[in-house]
């Protein structure tokens, strides 16, 4: 076991703990069952992120979704087209600019998508609730830094 005296003492202990924890977290998240009403749609993790934004933040444009997902608008357009053909998403005209389309979750699927995302959201709320706002921000920033570091190494 590392000691705090070493330059990487407790950091190494934390890294070890996280390397053991992350696969368990991912495994548990993957075991959250897709509601029966959505099983036939072959939804993937890329769909989950898009649906999460629409569920929590409400309808938005393709460009807004692309910005939040940090992908190209053409990528979002393909996802939206796929989910629209399946009836999961709806496109409607933007009243302020009729050239733009607003994307939202179809009313028929709103409750199933909400039920699918609810266990994960509830778990995060329970885990984050005891933390101060600054601690929550640090936690999220740390996960974002980890994602960026892993992403940068994947490109090597």
Image: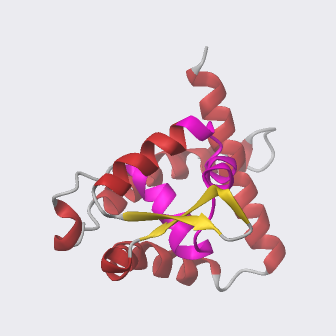
Residue at x-position 62% and y-position 23%: 153
**What count of labels does the image hold?**
0
From this view, report whether residue 91 is shown above or below residue 108.
above
In-image side of 37 versus 20 (left or right): left
Q: Quadrant of residue 21?
A: bottom left
Q: Residue furthest top?
A: 156
In this view, the residue in front, 25 or 12, is 25
- Is residue 127 depicted above or below 15 in this figure? below
Query: Who is closer to the viewer here, 99 or 39?
Result: 99
Residue 36 makes an appearance in the image = yes
Q: Is residue 56 part of the magenta span, yes or no?
A: yes
Let me know if residue 46 appears in the view: no
Relative image position of residue 12 (x, y in whole percent): 65, 42
**Of 63 and 113, which appears nearest the observer?**
63
Which residue does the image show at 47% across and 82% down from the upper left? 122
**Quadrant holding the C terminus:** top right
The colour scheme is: secondary structure
The verdict on residue 17 being magenta is no
Q: Position of residue 115 (x, y in %)?
A: 34, 80
| Magenta-colored segment: predominant secondary structure | helix
Q: Residue 75, how many percent across, how many down?
A: 52, 37
Query: In terms of depth relative to the viewer, which is nearer, 145 or 91?
Result: 91
Q: Which residues are magenta?
A: 45-74
* Residue at 57% across, 75% down: 56
Residue that appears at 50% across and 57% down: 50
Q: Quadrant of residue 60?
A: bottom right
Q: Looking at this rendering, what residue extends furthest in the front direction?
A: 98
Relative placement, left or right, of 43 versus 92 is left
Residue 70 in picture, x, y percent from top left: 65, 43
């Amino acid at each position: 076991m590392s000691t705090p005296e070493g330059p990487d003492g407790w950091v190494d202990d934390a890294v070890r703990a996280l390397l053991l924890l992350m696969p368990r977290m991912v495994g548990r998240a993957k075991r959250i069952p897709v509601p029966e009403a959505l099983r036939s749609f072959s939804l993937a993790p890329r769909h989950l992120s898009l649906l999460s934004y629409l569920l929590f933040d409400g309808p938005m444009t393709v460009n807004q979704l692309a910005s939040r997902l940090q992908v190209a608008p053409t990528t979002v357009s393909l996802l939206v087209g796929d989910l629209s053909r399946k009836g999961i998403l709806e496109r409607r005209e933007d009243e302020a600019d009729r050239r733009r389309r607003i994307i939202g979750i179809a009313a028929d699927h709103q409750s199933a998508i909400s039920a699918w995302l609810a266990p994960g959201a509830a778990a995060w709320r329970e885990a984050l609730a005891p933390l101060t706002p600054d601690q929550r921000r640090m936690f999220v920033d740390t996960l974002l830094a980890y994602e960026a570091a892993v992403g940068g190494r994947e490109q090597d």
